[in-house]
Amino acid sequence: MAYDEESIVHAKEEETLILVGVAIGGAIGSVLRYLIQTHSLQWFGTSFPYGTLLVNVAGSLLIGFLSFILLERITVSEEVRFAILVGVLGGFTTFSTFSFETLNLIQQGNFISAMGNVLVSVSLCLFACFLGLSLARAI
């Protein structure tokens, strides 16, 4: 299948818009994560990674809710959908921080807290995603 030059240019422009949207969304999500994690340390202390748990559960709820809304209920451009779902929520949630903090708990000999973090994080994030999707379907 042959593509003309105009189609190729148009496809590259669309991809560029998606990349810019994801980058801007990622910056927004990362800043939100930083603010929540910083304030969580002040609110809850440092004995458990509450900030990471909070952003990952909230992000799971939001991705369940927004993925359905943005794909099934309202019409948005592909650029906006990627900016929100990949950019903002990708920058907001963080599996790498979850892994690092869990490893730190293990290295400090806090095995119960480490396993608790794994069980609570995975369980709550899956439930939050299910809840978000269910809420979106209900409206």
Image: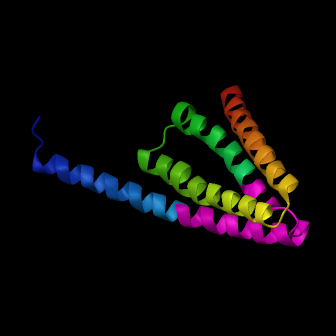
**For the stretch drawn in magenta, what is the main secondary structure?**
helix
Counting from the top left corner in percent of width and height, residue 58 is at 73, 50
Query: Left or right of 6: which side holds 102?
Result: right
Q: Nearer the viewer, residue 68 or 119?
A: 119
Q: Is residue 43 magenta?
A: yes
Determine the residue positioned at 12% across, 42% down: 3
Determine the residue positioned at 80% across, 55% down: 114
Query: Left or right of 121: which side holds 6?
Result: left
Counting from the top left corner in percent of width and height, residue 14 is at 32, 52
Counting from the top left corner in percent of width and height, residue 120 is at 81, 45
Determine the residue positioned at 77% across, 39% down: 123
Q: Nearer the viewer, residue 86 or 72?
A: 86
Scheme of image coloration: rainbow
Please give the count of numbered marks on the rendered protein.
0
Judge whether 79 appears above or below 26 on screen: above
**Start and end of the magenta stretch?**
26-55
Q: Nearer the viewer, residue 95 or 110?
A: 110
